[in-house]
Image (cartoon, rainbow, N blue to C red):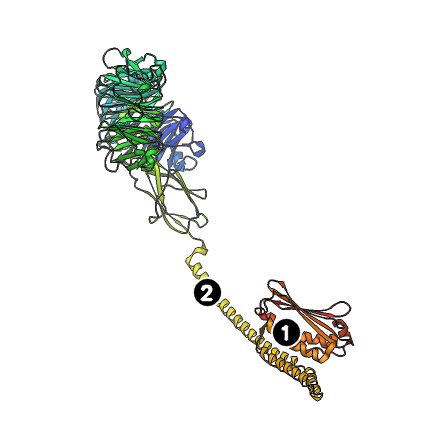
């Protein structure tokens, strides 16, 4: 058996790979806000738990090599450079001799190696030369000594409880009377200026070669003896608690020395210069290989790997036996045993280990006298008494066939159920060597076909299993298909467990955790509820808690109530993935990983988890830096965007969720980003609130920044009022103008309508041409004189009907095409009787035209027909013919053509004497012009000669 001399404590390491400017670190400081500052040979870094923000000479440092850091009561972070110059960081900016005249007074010939602020706020600077400096913020007081045996080289200052300032150098101890220093009879023989530290209660601790000493005024006491070799090994800055517990940094690493003599060595062979403790009780080690953080005791993680004696790092399964031993199933058929509490470690290899390969599961049998294991090839058992090499293994088929075993479970009556690639097999009496044959398979009784994943015996000896179909149960010899009860129960199930109240808990492959009770799915837990991942691999139930391994870490869930979920984010560096199995004990939880055995204390559920502290590191607007510590600033109208850079200080949990809002009345918006850009700000007052939480904590108290976005002049109230007034006045003027125009238009339309009416009356008169009436009357008289009574009656009847029709249509502006045709027929028939064979006419109407529905202006065609007869046909000796054609030019226009074969309009105009025009045609044209001013679609009339003789009148009417 190999004895483990020291357990390996996991320590988080930060290096240049994480953002440090250099691994060679000199000094570490936690400021009052909680940031960790690291001084290196390549600048200074400020760490918020996730990001290192580095400052160098480009940002204002006088030198990149900073050897010491200190914070004063006003919040200034002082930097002591290797070139002797001082600078400080305050409210986001570094001040040096170039931008701060007062710092020029603090230019020394040596390097500042110590810093102290007394009750009066005076700053004391010790140097590596014969010089001690006091600064009150305005004036500088320098102290030195001409005596070679009592110089101020490497002086460390502290103030005791009575207000006396003491200065301990390499040569002597002095006290200050307010004006000058006086030698004391006492000596403070610290190994170096690094091994002396002042306390907040105005006492002091220092290391000499005997050990740790306590100083109160002029009294000194040795409180802890230390091996001289540890102090002589280049001891650095130390951290002490209660005066008798020491964390010592030296060339060989870090030593934790307790009053009972316990000594723990961390970071062996890593040169360490300093140890500090932060406000969360984490320990920080400053080394020449970067920074290391050891979590507080309740959160420390321990690890065993091949360096501590494991046969290999990859562990597949875990179990414990009656002898308080931990069994670890490894690859290649190897098992490791850890004896406790002595932490003895031994390992052995199974017979036929090449067949078994990885030991996938380990379970104590029902009799608790043997450890049963499973591998891809089969299962076997190892007796707890006797030689471990006496294991008995069984395989399926007796012919060494690989069964593709996924998991197994042991029932209370020693039966074994196996989940295999072919199905679920139940062995009621597995015998001593677990061997059996496929001939023993009885479908529906001891074998259930279908690729299976998990088997589990519940409290009442019922068997639960999952396969390709989902969740099923064998109870009292009957198969119950629970996957029919809910779609989620058909998903792949990786593990099964049972709670005290009988609830079945299922770990699914992508759907989180399911709680199944009395045939119903009672609850589902996913990432939305706080799970690290929805892919859950293993379950374990103990002491009212459910432990689950996910693909992204581990969780612990309370059994009852709301099933509150606890995250172990501080373990994510080791347990975020590649976790294969777990063993939950009362005081310790163990995890099998690909990196070794990881374990930590099983502490109670932390219901009062401290919330993370939110800090705003910088604020900018339009590339202008704003002071992050200020509030109530004003953004100019053109600077209507703002950016916030922030962080939540938590050095163990990196999974931090933020929420923010711009006004208290607005809902919260959640984000994981540490940068927020807000643009297009409306004028007004804003209250930016920002808070954060980890997986286990509540939301922190919001950090608040108030600011005002100024408005453009055109967004101001007076401008908007003036604009409204101008708009109202303009609207009034426009309304008056439109109303006046509308009235004018109405008056014009009224005038037009009156004019049209007048023209219609005149057209009526023109239609009753006196010559026409006289000739008609002569014709009637002629027929009467010749006693042709029938012809006289016909002409008289036609003339009467024409007169009546004239009187009818003259009262209407528009008539139907049918009425117009009737009127034209009466008129043309009378003209035909007058002229006899010298006049002929034809009417051609497109049958597609709806004569009753088609409307045309009244008295519009007759003047053109009359003009064609008298001025086109009558001048010819033989008379002539008129053809009237009506057709559809398109769906919305009616085309009427009046075609005569007379002398032609051009010839007629040349033969005319004087300026006489047809009165009917002139009146008709005026009517059409007036109608076109009122109607949206105009009437178009075209008169042209048809070749040498003849005339065509084309009238295009909208319809």
Nearer the observer, 900 or 237: 900
Q: In the image, residue 67 lies at what x, y percent?
A: 37, 27
> Is residue 891 visible to the viewer in this orientation of the structure?
yes
Residue at the spot of label 1: 860
Nearer the observer, 101 or 213: 213
In the rendered view, does 16 fall on the left or right side of 787? left
Residue at the spot of label 2: 728
**Within-10-Å neighbours for mark 2: few <14, some 14–19, many 20+:** few
Q: Quadrant of residue 824?
A: bottom right
Q: How many marks?
A: 2
Nearer the observer, 851 or 755: 851
Nearer the observer, 600 or 865: 865
Q: In the image, residue 713 lies at what x, y percent?
A: 45, 55
In the rendered view, does 201 fall on the left or right side of 107? left
Could you tell me which secondary element the residue under label 2 belongs to? helix
Dot label at residue 898: none
Q: Which is more N-terminal, label 1 or label 2?
A: 2
Of circles 2 and 1, the one toward us is 1
């Amino acid at each position: 058996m190999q004895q483990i001399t020291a357990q390996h404590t996991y320590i988080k390491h930060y290096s240049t790979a994480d953002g440090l400017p250099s691994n060679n670190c000199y000094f570490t400081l936690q400021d009052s806000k909680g940031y960790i500052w690291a001084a290196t040979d390549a600048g200074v870094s400020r760490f918020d738990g996730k990001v290192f923000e580095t400052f160098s000479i480009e940002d204002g440092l006088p030198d990149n090599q900073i050897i010491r850091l200190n914070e004063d009561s006003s919040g200034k972070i002082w930097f002591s450079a290797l070139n002797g110059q001082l600078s400080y960081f305050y409210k986001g900016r570094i001040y040096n001799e170039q931008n701060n005249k007062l710092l020029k007074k603090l230019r020394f010939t040596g390097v500042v190696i110590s810093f102290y602020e007394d009750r009066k706020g005076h700053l004391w600077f010790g140097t590596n030369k014969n010089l001690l400096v006091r600064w009150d913020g305005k004036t500088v007081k320098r102290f030195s000594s001409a005596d070679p045996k009592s110089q101020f080289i490497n002086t460390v200052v502290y103030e005791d409880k009575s207000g006396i300032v003491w200065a301990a150098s390499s040569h002597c101890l002095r006290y200050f009377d307010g004006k000058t220093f006086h030698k004391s009879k006492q000596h403070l023989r610290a190994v170096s200026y690094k091994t002396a530290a002042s306390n907040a209660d105005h006492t002091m601790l220092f290391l000499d070669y005997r050990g740790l000493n306590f100083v109160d005024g002029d009294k000194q006491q040795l409180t802890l003896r230390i091996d001289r070799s540890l102090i002589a090994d280049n001891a650095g800055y130390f951290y002490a608690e209660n005066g008798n517990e020491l964390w010592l940094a030296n060339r060989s690493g870090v030593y934790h020395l307790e009053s009972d003599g316990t000594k723990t060595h961390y970071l062996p062979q890593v040169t360490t210069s300093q140890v500090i403790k932060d406000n969360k009780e984490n320990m920080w080690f400053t080394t020449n290989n970067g920074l290391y953080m050891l979590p507080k005791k309740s959160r420390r993680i321990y690890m065993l790997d091949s360096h501590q004696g494991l046969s290999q790092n990859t562990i597949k399964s875990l179990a414990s036996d009656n002898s308080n031993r931990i069994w670890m199933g490894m690859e290649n058929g190897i098992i490791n045993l850890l004896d406790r509490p002595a932490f003895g470690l031994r390992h052995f290899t199974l017979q036929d280990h090449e067949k078994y390969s990885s030991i996938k599961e380990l379970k104590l049998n029902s009799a608790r006298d043997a450890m049963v294991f499973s591998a891809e090839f089969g299962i076997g058992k190892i007796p707890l008494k006797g030689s471990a090499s006496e294991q008995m293994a069984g395989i399926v088929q007796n012919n060494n066939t690989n069964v593709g075993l996924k998991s197994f479970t042991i029932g209370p009556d020693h039966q074994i159920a196996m989940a295999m690639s072919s199905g679920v097999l139940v062995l009621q009496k597995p015998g001593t060597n677990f061997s059996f044959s496929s001939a023993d398979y009885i479908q529906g009784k001891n074998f259930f076909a279908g690729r299976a994943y998990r088997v589990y015996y519940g409290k009442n000896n019922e068997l639960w299993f999952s396969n390709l179909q989902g969740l099923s149960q064998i109870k009292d010899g009957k198969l119950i298909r629970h996957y029919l009860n809910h779609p989620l129960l058909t998903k792949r199930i990786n593990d099964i467990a049972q709670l005290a109240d009988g609830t079945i808990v299922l770990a699914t492959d992508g759907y989180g955790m399911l709680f199944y009770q009395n045939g119903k799915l009672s609850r589902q837990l996913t990432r939305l509820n706080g799970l690290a991942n929805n892919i859950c691999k293993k379950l374990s139930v103990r002491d009212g808690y459910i432990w689950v391994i996910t693909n992204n870490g581990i969780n612990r869930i309370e059994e009852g109530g709301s099933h509150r979920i606890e995250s172990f984010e501080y373990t994510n560096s080791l347990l975020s993935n590649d976790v294969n199995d777990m063993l939950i004990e009362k005081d310790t939880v163990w995890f099998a990983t690909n990196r070794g055995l990881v374990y930590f204390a099983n502490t109670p559920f932390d219901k009062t988890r401290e919330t993370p502290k939110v800090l705003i590191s910088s604020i900018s607007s339009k590339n202008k830096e704003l002071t992050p510590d200020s509030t109530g600033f004003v953004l100019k109208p053109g600077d209507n965007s703002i950016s916030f850079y922030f962080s939540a200080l938590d050095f163990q949990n990196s999974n931090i969720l933020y929420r923010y809002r711009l006004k208290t009345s607005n809902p919260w918006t959640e984000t994981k980003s540490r940068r927020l850009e807000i643009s297009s700000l409306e004028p007004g007052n804003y209250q930016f609130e920002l808070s954060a939480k980890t997986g286990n904590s509540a939301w922190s108290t919001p950090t608040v920044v108030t600011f005002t976005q100024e408005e453009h002049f055109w967004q101001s109230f007076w401008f908007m009022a003036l604009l409204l007034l101008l708009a109202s006045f303009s609207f009034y003027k426009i309304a008056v103008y439109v109303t006046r125009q509308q009235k004018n238009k109405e008056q014009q339309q009224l005038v037009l309508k009156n004019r049209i009416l007048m023209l219609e009356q005149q057209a009526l008169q023109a239609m009753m041409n006196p010559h026409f009436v006289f000739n008609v009357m002569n014709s009637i008289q002629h027929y009467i004189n010749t006693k042709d009574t029938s012809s006289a009656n016909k002409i008289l009847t036609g003339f009467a009907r024409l007169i009546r029709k004239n009187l009818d249509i003259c009262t209407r502006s528009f008539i139907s095409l049918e009425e117009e045709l009737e009127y034209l027929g009466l008129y043309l028939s009378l003209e035909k009787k007058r002229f006899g064979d010298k006049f002929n006419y034809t009417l051609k109407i497109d049958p597609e035209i709806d004569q009753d529905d088609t409307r045309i202006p009244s008295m519009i065609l007759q003047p053109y027909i009359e003009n064609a007869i008298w001025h086109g046909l009558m001048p010819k000796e033989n008379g002539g013919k008129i053809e009237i054609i009506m057709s559809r030019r398109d769906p919305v226009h009616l085309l009427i053509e009046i075609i005569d074969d007379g002398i032609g309009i051009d010839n007629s105009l040349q033969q005319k004497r004087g300026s006489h025009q047809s009165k009917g045609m002139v009146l008709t044209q005026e009517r059409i012009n007036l109608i076109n001013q009122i109607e949206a679609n105009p009437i178009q009339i075209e008169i042209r000669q048809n070749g040498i003789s003849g005339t065509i009148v084309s009238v295009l009417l909208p319809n």
